[in-house]
Amino acid sequence: MKKILTLILVLTATSLIAQPLNTAKVGWDYTDADLTTYSITEFQIKYDFAGTWASVGIPTDTVVIIGGKTYFTPLIIGTGPHDVSIRACNINLCGDPIGPLAFIKPGSGKNLKIVGGK
């Protein structure tokens, strides 16, 4: 299977400041031709070099690019430093993974309050 995937980490916001951090997603590019040629049935994700690969299916959250799509799936992982890898699979086997992409998922604030006013 060709290694055509390009892994990116994105926030769903057009403005990084305006959106909560829990909307973080991971995205990757895959060509329509390779999706058909290699009979791709799912993409799999793996965090932190450990554990097992988990299927994310073929995500419907996509953006059309020239010759293919960027596929997105939520980053379902705790705060702190991490890495993520993605691979494409058909019913027989999976291709080489792309990544890892290292990132730090920030924590949320604490002790929310309103100060001042009458």
Image (tube, rainbow, N blue to C red):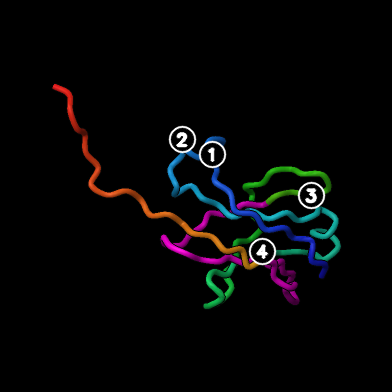
- C-alpha span from label 3 to label 1: 22 Å
The mark closer to the camera, 3 or 1, is 1
Left or right relative to 112: residue 104: right
- Circle 4/circle 3 CB separation < 8 Å: no
- C-alpha span from label 2 to label 4: 30 Å
Q: Is residue 34 above or below residue 113?
A: below
**Magenta extent:** 71-98
* Residue at which label 4 appears: 43
Name the amino acid, label 3: Gly
Which disc is residue 13 wearing? 1
Residue 41 is one of the magenta-drawn residues: no
- Describe the element under mark 4 as helix, strand or loop: strand
Name the amino acid, label 2: Ala
Q: Earlier in the sequence, mark 1 or mark 2?
A: 1
Name the amino acid, label 4: Phe
- Of residue 85 and residue 45, the one placed in the foreground of this image is 85
Q: Is residue 24 above or below residue 103?
A: above
The mark closer to the camera, 2 or 4, is 2
Which disc is residue 18 wearing? 2
